[in-house]
C-alpha cells in the first residue's frame, strides 16, 4: 500500500538575508485535516518560512508541494493566488470600506449568486449571518477574527497558513474561537500550518509540533513526545520552567546531592546538565525523603530552605535555596502550599522524569 501524499510538503526550504540563513533547511509534511504548529521564539524564522510557503517571499532553495504538485522549486514559482493556499494573520487585515459579505467574498470568482450563496453559508457556519451587511468596525475583535476565517476559507484552499491569528484576542475569547476555527478547518479538509510562540497554544491545538530555533526545526512530533522527550535542554525549557543540576559522568553515572543518575553512552569526564521540571520535585518535611507515597524512582533527599512561595491559581510555586551549593530550585505543588521563608524542607527528584544532556549540546 502506497504512502498517502501529504497535502503540504515542504522540502529543505532555505531563505537568506544578508548572507544569514533565516530559514535553514526546513522540511515538514502536513496531511489533509491535520494541524501542525510551527513553534519557536520570536525571530527564529517562523513567519519567514510561512511567507516562502505562501509565495509572498521567494526562497533561496528548497521546494514546496501541494498535493504532490510543486508550487515552487528551483524552476517553478506559482503566484501566491494560484497556490490554493489560504492565509490568516494576527491583524485580520479586513477591508474597512467593505461590508462583511464583501470581505468574505473578496477572493471568490464566478456568478454573483454562487458567490453570495458561499458567503452566506460560511457566515452561518461562524455564527455571523446576522452581520452580513455590517462593516468590520461594527464588530468585536472575536467577530472580526471569524470574518477573517470565513474569508480565508471561502475559496476552499487546500492549505491554510496561520500566523499567530489569535494573539490579538482577549483571553476569555481565545480558547473558544481557536477551537471553533480548527473544527471548521478540519471539516474543510485543509492542511493547517499555524505559527505561534506560545507552547500552551501549540499543545492545545496541534496534532504535531515542529519546534524551531535559529532558522531550523530542532524537533518534530506529537505534543506528548515533544514535551516528554525534549531534544535538548533548550527544548525542555521552552515548554516550562526547568531546574538544572550540573554534574560529571563517571562510568555512565553522574553523582549529585540527590543520588546517582544514569548517563548511558556519555564518555567519562563529560559535564552534563540534569534537567527536572518543577512539578517533578517532591517535597518532604523530614530527611527520609520517602514522603507519604514513595516510589522506587525517588532519589536521595537534599535539604533546601524556602525563599518564597506564591499561589498561582491551580498550583503553588515554592523556591528553595539548596544547602549543598546555594543554587535555587523551584517546585510546584497542586492547590495551596505556602510555607514561610526560612523553613528548611527536604527535596527528592523523580529519576524517571529527568533529562540528562551533555553541556556542549546546549549551544543555542
Image (cartoon, rainbow, N blue to C red):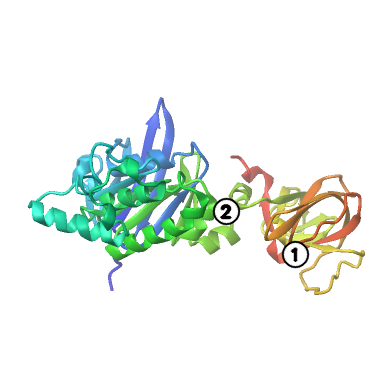
Give the spatial CA distance, label 1 vs label 2: 19 Å
| Coordinates of residue 302 in the picture (x, y in percent) | 87, 57
Residue closest to the far left: 111
Q: How many marks?
A: 2
Circle 2 — which element? loop
* Quadrant in which the N terminus is drawn: bottom left
Quick check: 33 left or right of 285?
left
Question: Residue 261: x and y, percent?
Answer: 76, 60
Give left or right: position of 235 versus 182.
right
Give the secondary structure at mark 1.
Answer: loop
- Residue positioned 31% across, 50% down in the render: 147
**Quarter of image, res 264:** bottom right
- On screen, 122 above or below 238? below
**Point 41% across, 25% down: residue:** 18
* Label 1 Cα neighbours within 10 Å, binned few <14 / some 14-19 / many ≥20: some
Mark 1 lies on residue:
350
Q: Nearer the viewer, residue 144 or 246?
A: 144
Classed neighbour count for the residue bearing mark 2: other residues with Cα under 10 Å, few (<14), some (14–19), many (≥20): some
Q: Is residue 83 left or right of residue 264?
A: left
Q: Which residue has dot 2 on it?
A: 231
Q: Position of residue 309 (x, y in %)?
A: 80, 52
Amino acid at each position: 500500500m502506497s504512502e498517502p501524499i501529504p497535502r503540504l510538503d515542504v522540502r529543505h526550504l532555505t531563505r537568506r538575508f544578508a548572507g544569514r540563513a533565516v530559514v535553514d533547511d526546513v522540511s515538514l509534511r502536513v496531511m489533509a485535516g491535520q494541524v501542525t504548529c510551527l513553534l519557536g521564539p520570536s525571530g527564529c524564522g517562523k513567519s519567514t518560512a510561512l511567507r516562502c510557503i505562501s509565495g509572498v517571499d521567494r526562497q533561496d532553495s528548497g521546494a514546496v508541494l501541494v498535493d504532490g504538485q510543486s508550487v515552487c522549486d528551483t524552476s517553478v514559482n506559482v503566484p501566491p493566488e494560484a497556490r490554493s493556499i489560504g492565509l490568516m494573520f494576527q491583524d485580520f487585515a479586513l477591508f474597512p470600506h467593505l461590508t462583511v459579505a464583501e470581505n468574505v467574498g473578496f477572493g471568490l470568482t464566478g456568478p454573483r449568486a454562487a458567490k453570495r450563496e458561499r458567503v452566506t453559508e460560511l457566515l452561518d457556519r461562524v455564527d455571523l449571518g446576522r452581520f452580513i451587511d455590517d462593516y468590520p468596525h461594527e464588530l468585536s475583535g472575536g467577530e472580526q477574527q471569524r470574518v477573517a476565517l470565513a474569508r480565508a476559507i471561502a475559496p476552499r484552499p487546500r492549505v491554510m497558513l496561520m500566523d499567530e491569528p489569535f494573539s490579538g484576542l482577549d483571553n476569555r475569547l481565545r480558547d473558544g474561537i481557536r477551537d471553533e476555527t480548527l473544527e471548521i478547518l478540519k471539516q474543510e479538509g485543509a492542511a493547517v500550518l499555524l505559527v505561534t510562540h506560545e507552547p500552551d497554544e501549540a499543545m492545545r491545538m496541534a496534532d504535531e509540533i515542529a519546534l524551531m530555533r535559529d532558522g531550523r526545526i530542532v524537533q518534530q512530533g506529537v505534543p506528548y513526545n515533544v514535551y516528554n522527550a525534549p531534544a535538548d535542554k533548550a527544548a525542555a525549557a521552552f515548554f516550562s520552567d526547568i531546574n538544572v543540576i550540573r554534574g560529571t559522568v563517571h562510568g555512565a553515572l553522574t553523582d549529585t546531592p540527590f543520588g546517582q543518575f544514569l548517563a548511558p553512552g556519555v564518555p567519562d569526564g563529560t559535564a552534563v546538565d540534569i534537567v527536572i521540571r518543577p512539578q517533578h520535585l517532591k517535597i518532604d518535611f523530614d530527611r527520609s525523603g520517602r514522603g507519604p507515597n514513595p516510589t522506587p524512582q525517588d532519589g536521595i533527599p537534599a535539604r533546601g530552605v524556602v525563599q518564597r512561595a506564591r499561589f498561582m491559581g491551580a498550583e503553588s510555586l515554592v523556591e528553595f535555596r539548596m544547602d549543598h551549593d546555594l543554587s535555587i530550585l523551584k517546585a510546584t505543588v497542586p492547590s495551596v502550599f505556602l510555607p514561610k521563608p526560612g523553613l528548611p524542607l527536604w527535596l527528592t527528584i523523580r529519576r524517571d522524569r529527568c533529562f540528562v544532556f551533555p553541556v556542549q549540546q546546549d549551544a543555542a
